[in-house]
Amino acid sequence: MKTGILIYKRWAIVETICYLYSILFLYTASSKLMGLSDFKLQMNRSEFLGPFAEWIAWMVPLLEIVLAILLLIKAYRLAALYGSLILMTFFTGYIAWMLRFSDHIPCSCGGVISSMGWETHLVFNACWIALALIGIMLWENKGKKSTSKNTVQSKGKPKTLEKE
């Protein structure tokens, strides 16, 4: 009975993380697309991203939308969690890089998030990175726990209890 409760809690945590990420990505993507010209302008102001502004202005929100959808489909959830982790890590790295090496830091975030200070934004992103890591670990451990139930140790080698 305890195992069932733990599995349910794990599932509920992963579901919550995926829904929160989906909401975040859909919100920021829609904000970027609704203010596409401003988003492009902010990208152009970046000495680092300026040459790629047109491409980035379309690809980032589209990637956010794709990830938001994939996070809601269980078959793609783990890949989408990894994608979310990578995207958030890139966003965080960009902010850290700009804080360290740039005099002007253009904000290309969407909606309310753009009103955050840069240090707050780093903490905000770090929390989302932690959520993605938690989701990935819980999802991957789910598979390990369920397969370990069906094996028995015999002379150092696991034997499967199910018929082959």
Image (cartoon, rainbow, N blue to C red):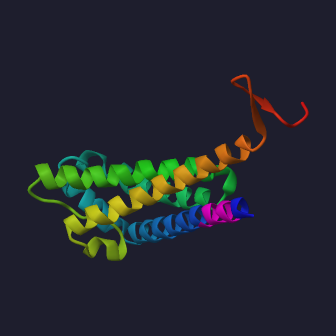
Residue shown at the point (38%, 49%) measured from the top left: 55
Specify whether residue 11 is in view.
yes
Query: Which quadrant: the N terminus?
Result: bottom right
Image x and y of residue 119, in percent: 20, 65
Which residue occupies the extreme left position in the image? 103
Quadrant housing the C terminus: top right
> Going by the picture, which residue comes out furthest to the front?
155
Q: Position of residue 64 (x, y in %)?
A: 48, 58
Q: Residue sitting at 71 percent across and 41 percent down?
A: 148
Q: Is residue 54 visible?
A: no
The question of residue 113 being in magenta is answered with: no
On the image, which quarter does residue 18 sit in? bottom right
Q: Is residue 72 left or right of residue 87?
A: right
Q: Is residue 22 left or right of residue 103?
A: right
Q: Position of residue 36 (x, y in %)?
A: 37, 66
Magenta region: 5-12
Q: Foreground: 152 or 98?
A: 152
Identify the residue shown where x is 27% and y is 66%: 121
Residue closest to the eye, 41 or 107? 107
* Main secondary structure found in the magenta portion: helix
Residue 152 versus residue 66: which sits nearer the camera?
Answer: 152
In the depicted structure, whether residue 121 falls above or below residue 51: below
> Is 86 or 53 nearer to us in this picture?
86
Q: Quadrant of residue 160?
A: top right
Coordinates of residue 53 in the picture (x, y in percent): 30, 52
**Vertical comparison of 4 with 116: above or below:** above
Residue drawn at (24%, 56%) of the image = 95
How many marks the image carries: the answer is 0
